[in-house]
Image (cartoon, grey):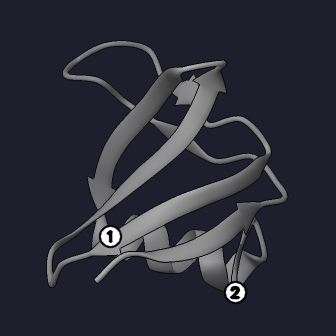
Amino acid sequence: MPQFATVTGQVTYMPGDGTPIKVPKGRIEVELAPDSAILSWEQADGVVGSAAIPRTQFDEYVEAGSIELE
């Protein structure tokens, strides 16, 4: 079940073998699975951004305060 959080610090994801891309600061929707977290946000009006990151990386962002759960 999705929940909401706020990105308050530097959070990145890496698409494939590419360069890390920043998740914009602000409110995001989070869907957690045992091994991953899917982050979704509004990139622009009507445009949704989305990224999947390892669950361990998500937990590290939460512990560091870069993502604050609601």
Q: Residues within 10 Å of mark 1 (few under 14, many from 20)?
A: some
Residue at image location 66% in from the left, 85% down from the top:
63
Residue at image location 32% in from the left, 13% down from the top:
18
Image position, residue 5 (x, y; %): 65, 71
| Picture layout, residue 35 above or below residue 42 | below
Q: Residues within 10 Å of mark 2 (few under 14, many from 20)?
A: few
| Picture layout, residue 7 above or below residue 57 | above
Residue type at mark 2 is: Glu
Q: Secondary structure at mark 2?
A: loop
Image position, residue 32 (x, y; %): 29, 77
In the drawing, does residue 52 fall left or right of residue 63?
left
Residue at the far front in the pictured view: 46
Q: 54 or 2: which is nearer to us?
A: 2
Residue type at mark 1 is: Glu
Residue at image location 32% in from the left, 70% down from the top:
31
User: Label 1 to label 2, Cα distance in Å?
Assistant: 13 Å
Residue at image location 37% in from the left, 75% down from the top:
2
In the drawing, does residue 5 fall left or right of residue 37?
right
In the drawing, does residue 42 fall left or right of residue 29?
right
In the figure, residue 27 lies in which quadrant? bottom right
In the figure, residue 30 lies in which quadrant? bottom left
Image position, residue 54 (x, y; %): 27, 61
Q: Which mark is residue 70?
A: 2
Please give the residue where the numbered disc 1 appears in the rendered image: 31
